[in-house]
Image (cartoon, helix red, strand yellow):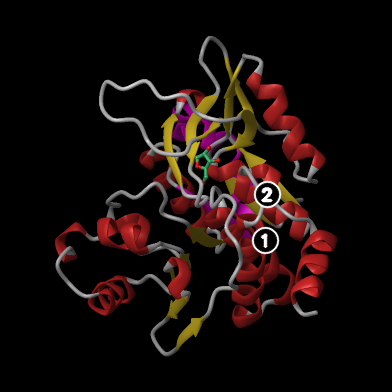
Amino acid sequence: MAKILVIGSMNMDLVVETERYPEEGETLIGGKFEQIPGGKGANQALAAAKLGDQVEFIGACGDDSFAPKLKSSLKAGGAEIDNIFEIKGVSTGVAVITVDKKGNNRIIVSPGANYELDPEKIEKIKDKIAEAEIILLQLEIPVDTIEKIVEIASKNKTKIILDPAPAQKLPADILTRVDYLLPNEGELDLLLAEAENKSRLEKIEALLKMGVKNIIVTEGEKGIYYYSQNKELHLETLKVKAVDTTAAGDVFAGAFAASLIAENNLKKALEFAVQAAAYSVTKRGAQSSIPDKKELNEFLAERSK
Ligand code: RIB
């Protein structure tokens, strides 16, 4: 039985390196092209599986050539994949990604089968949600599906971690049930559209008042800010030479869930997540940048020399 259940997207990432971005109407010759397994859901499941254990990923794929490659990547990293829905005649999710010289990315997702993961399919796996200790969610599947998952999880006291990416406004009946909300600055702004002109602290206060129990705001190089009703923390990020920031947030979320289950210690889980995300930034791609425990320990040992 999975302790961590990740329900979300799986995408094949079509990645091109570029020196700069094209102007409208311009054709630009880029650098190397690679197909790399990705998708925020699958990335987070793989990170949790490689850095922890008893992780299952539930998602939807098409019946094309991308699907088996994405499944193999998850399986190789130790995630259970017995409940991935295969949708006939629909493309597996795809992300078109450009990465520039500084390691920054621009991503367009074509959701394909990810948007076929509807509430009816969630009904079929509701026992898994009820039995899991933690459910880890992102926003690359339909919002009504997220609502259904959150409703089942909260009824059964399964802890809910939500990474609200890609950024969008969410209904209160989702937000009020979230145990750990992991927005970056942009996502925090969009979550509460009515609070757009408010300060970060005012937005946080509004979310805590709504019932979100723990809020972890990732602010790139400025670090990680944690808030609950009675506690605040700030953690520095590790300084690394960025090669590719794709999926750093996913590695953070997966590592955070893995450590929270293993140690039940919030500060340790945040520190572990910061370390794993820093590792991922030094490697190219999404799932290709996720460390296992040994790789992460070697990376940390090398830094401390
Ligand atoms: O967070 C990175 C991920 O976003 C990529 O792997 C891509 O598939 C998109 O989902």
The percent position of residue 64, horizontal first and vertical second, equals 62, 14
Q: Amino acid under label 2?
A: Ser
Depicted 203 relative to depicted 35: above or below: below
Q: Nearer the viewer, residue 287 or 191?
A: 287
What residue is pinned by disc 1?
279
- In terms of secondary structure, where does tag 1 sit? helix
The percent position of residue 102, horizontal first and vertical second, equals 50, 52
What residue is pinned by disc 2?
289
Magenta stretch contains residue 226:
no
Q: Which residues are magenta?
A: 114-138
Say whether disc 1 or disc 2 marks the residue closer to the N-terminus: 1
- In terms of secondary structure, where does tag 2 sit? helix
Magenta stretch contains residue 130:
yes
Quarter assignment of residue 23: top left
Q: CA distance from mark 1 to mark 2?
A: 8 Å
The percent position of residue 88, horizontal first and vertical second, equals 57, 12
Quadrant including the C terminus: bottom right
Q: Nearer the viewer, residue 217 or 4?
A: 217
Quarter assignment of residue 38: top right
The percent position of residue 92, horizontal first and vertical second, equals 55, 22
Quarter assignment of residue 253: bottom right
Q: Is residue 2 visible?
A: no
Q: Amino acid under label 1?
A: Tyr
